[in-house]
Image: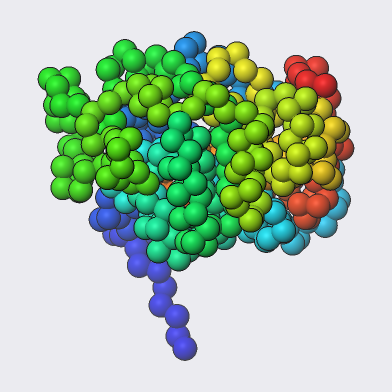
Amino acid sequence: MKTQPPKRHWLGSLGILRFRRPELRPAQRRLRRGVSVADLRAIARRRLPGGVFDYIDGGAEDELTLESNLEAYRRVQFRPRVLRDVGEVDISSSLLGKPLSMPLVLAPTGFTRIADPAGELAVARSAGRAGLPYTLSTLGTRSIEEVAATGSARLWFQVYVWRDRQLVADMVARAAESGYEALCLTVDTAVLGKRERDVRRGFTLPPKLGLSTIFDGMVHPGWTWQFLRSEPIVFANVAGQAVGDGSDAISLAEYVGRQFDPGLSWKDVEWLRSRWNGPIVLKGIQTIEDAKLAADEGIEAIALSNHGGRQLDSAPAPLDLLPGVADAVAGRTEIICDGGVRRGSDIVKALALGATACMAGRAYLYGLGAAGEAGVDHVLDLLASDMRRTMALIGCRTVGDIGRDYVSEDPRYRPIR
Ligand SMILES: Cc1cc2nc3c(=O)[nH]c(=O)nc-3n(C[C@H](O)[C@H](O)[C@H](O)COP(=O)(O)O)c2cc1C
């Protein structure tokens, strides 16, 4: 078959210029500018009303934890090995006895539909296409059953412990019934962190209409149009329950203060175990001592996490905890490193320091806010291609090859032992 020469613009035929075909689909057009997660964050920042962007992007108090989660990754340097034949790089891995296309789990994020009306359904579908598990939050804006009906990803269900234990028992039973494979119990939220960006803006869930929100909406017409056309955003897992489903504007701090039990203890972990047959992931472990206790309890996986810097300010960065925790419990429980992942190279660093996998929240929310479901696909593609490239550049062909030898004892890195 004769191949046609590529078409050129008349200026291009001068041999100097080639013109890109114009992209008519707005989301795809935005994604062309999204070369990194940082770019997608910038696009989401322009596209979302300020209060919505800050709800996603912000952290507690002075945001020291938020910053140190990111900084910890910057302080780790690679020790690249060369001449290693990296013609074929395989980023696949496994977690809780099942395969992963790369060592990453999508973290639970409450109120996801605030970023895009498709919300949790979009993220679950995207995770499914990428071959990754997705964790639905207790405070999801799509229900356990709706997310399961996408039939796509391996699903985990994140549990907050409500004062009303029956409500928790019912949700756990619904997750089992819907085929969720793991429970992820978040243990760093005895009370809600003080997220000062939200407090300053008087941010409520759902956003309350006032002069400033109306103005914010007018200058972000794309988001506002979608928001007004879609059904109201509520805490779908408790819709119709006495605890309130968030359909009356309420601050998250007020809701959590009223409904969640600060009396949560190891006894509740046992109670949860008695109600659930599958694996349990404890999310929010922040010391080596608690990691050891979790391993002693027979917990299948721990997520070293400070809730992405949204809870305690001045908490340790999960990456700094990794070597000490891995020395103490590796082989007894799997270790997930959660918080601050913005690049595939971050995942490689965490694996080198002892993680089995990473979790990421904001990275996919920036993609969702920037361009909906296609934006989440784009972020997951970026992380995978970053990871492949980094492994090739440090001389690792498989995830199993990555170990501490591949990162340097940079004096600025502050491992906690
Ligand atoms: C907007 C938003 C909502 C979140 N909601 C929850 C939640 O409902 N339950 C939970 O366990 N963690 C929640 N998290 C924390 C994430 O699960 C995860 O720990 C955090 O995003 C990791 O940090 P990263 O955003 O830097 O990846 C939330 C995070 C964000 C950004």
Given the current orientation, which residue lies at the most extreme bottom position?
1
Residue placed most toward the observer, 311 or 229: 311
Residue 274 position, x and y percent, is: 63, 48
x, y (%) of residue 260? 45, 29
Tell me if residue 146 comes above or below residue 2 in the rendering: above
Residue 405: image quadrant is: top right
Residue 132 as seen in the image, left or right of residue 29: right
**Residue drawn at (55%, 15%), measured in percent from left and top?**
313
- Residue 93 vs residue 24: left or right? right
Residue drawn 76% across and 44% down? 298
In this picture the colour scheme is rainbow
Q: Nearer the viewer, residue 101 or 95?
A: 95
Q: Quadrant of the C terminus?
A: top right
For the residue pair 409 and 103, the one nearer the viewer reads as 103
In the displayed structure, would residue 309 be above or below residue 42? above
User: Looking at the image, can residue 157 be seen?
Assistant: yes
Residue 350 figure quarter = top right
Q: Quick check: 143 above or below 37?
A: below
Left or right of 280: which side holds 411?
Answer: right
All told, the count of numbered labels is: 0
- Residue found at x 83% / y 50%: 401
Q: Which residue is at a point 74% across and 35% down the rendered structure image? A: 294
Q: As displayed, is residue 193 above or below residue 227? A: above
Q: Is residue 358 visible?
A: no
Q: Position of residue 277 (x, y in %)?
A: 63, 56
Residue 282: image location, x then y, percent: 64, 38
